[in-house]
Image (cartoon, rainbow, N blue to C red):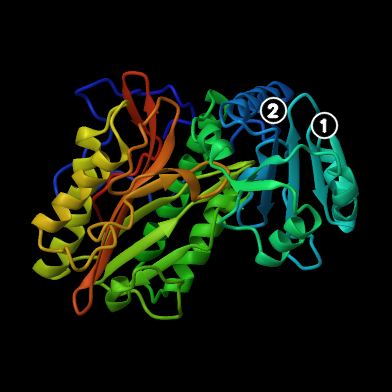
Amino acid sequence: MSSLPCADCVEFPVRRNPIGPVGARQSITGSGLTVQVSGLSRITPASEHAARLERVRAAMVAAELETLICFGDVSHTANTRYFTDFRPVNGFNGIQRALLTIRLGREPVLFVAEACLEHAQSMTSFAVRPFRAFTAAVQDVPPRVGLAGATHIPAQLLDQIRGHFPEWHLQPTDALARVMAVKSAWEVARIAEAARLTGAAYAAMESLVAAGEDVTERDLARAADGAMIAAGADGPAFLSMVQAGERSAFCSALPTDGPVRPGDVLRLDVGARYGTHVADVARTITIGEVGAAGDDVVDASVRAVQAGLDVLRPGMTAGTLSEAIRSVLHERGYGDHSEEAKGRGAGNGIGMDAAEELPWIGPDHAAVLEPGMVFTLRASVCKPGVGGARTGRVVHVRESGFEVLDDLPMRLRW
């Protein structure tokens, strides 16, 4: 898999990584895996942060906002991490949260817990202050205030902000999300590297299955996480999901000590974190012969995503792309057994977080897909008594087409 975003760019009508013949043995290396540790820098250059801030200020002017408050936490890092390499950590007493204020004509200010202050200052080029200084720092803020991260901010914190500043016209805004949705070449390279490192997870899991020994879902998850880190990842982007046999029919589930056996449908969703950015790559494996019903579930998921890739182009709407995937799932008879077929979204933006606010690939979404956008494109089937499947690709929209940043074939038999 190439670590560079411009390698193998897709020009219409050519598409990278076609499905390939169903049932064919794919080329991913299992046992004897050799991985290369990346040389890409994890530190965001000052020029990248400066360009982001300039774009966000322009978006604020367009939205008639004088101030933007950005909320981020350990699970939803992008709203604050877009401007600083500091990331909140797991815990309580505020260390898991951050607030950042942007005012037109002034430098941003980052607010963090007292315990994180020195750490944040070491990683941030502008002022960093403790949460207790927030009220005094924004006393003279003009009344038109936008809130980025309104769907994630705790109600108690939101009530405190509103209580301190009742005169503010505090309004949720997607101004920041729309800017973050369009990635720079620097960002795309890091997402592509995270996708490459995710390939090491799949190779390690295949090797473990091929060994023919007793193996559990949890064994595969451990192997996946370890292989990504050994290859140069900072860790998994999220808790790796491994579901085998009847459990593959669950929409999303964490691994158990349940066995993985020949004849199982094996549903996998893993991703690596590389520096500030992540990948999310979902595949469903058939181990040996799984029967016609199991094969059909997997094939429907793969064909639905391929239908999306067949129509994907800059300038189309997210809703049109979603409909291409939904229609295949309905045609295959899985309208009642698929979240995407039910209209709950066939993809989402990806970057610093595995699920970013925009673009949202859902029905009736009129947002236009722009060059630079990076998102997952997915299709799932969950049929009790048969099994389940999820196929998810990471795609980058370009001026004249798109490229797929993960290099795993969509149909895999182990």
Quadrant of the rendered image containing residue 148: top right
Badge 1: residue crowd in 10 Å (few <14, some 14–19, many ≥20): some
In percent of width and height, residue 147 lies at 64, 46
Pick the quarter of the image with the C terminus.
bottom left
Q: Is residue 254 above or below residue 302?
A: below
Relative to 310, 285 lies left or right: right
Q: Residue 194: give x, y in percent of width and height.
A: 52, 42
Q: Amino acid at mark 1?
A: Ser
Quadrant position of residue 395: top left
Is residue 17 among the parts visible in the rendering? Answer: yes
Precedes in sequence: disc 2 or disc 1: 2
Residue occupying the point 27% across, 62% down:
389
Q: Which residue is mark 1?
A: 125
Q: Are marks 2 and 1 in contact (CB under 8 Å)?
A: yes
Question: Which residue, given by chain and number where applicable, does mark 2 sit on?
Answer: 49
Q: Position of residue 386 (x, y in %)?
A: 19, 75
Q: Is residue 259 left or right of residue 334?
A: right
Amino acid on which disc 2 is placed: His
At 16% from the left and 56% from the top, the residue drawn is 329
Question: From the viewer's perspective, is residue 270 above or below residue 242?
Answer: above
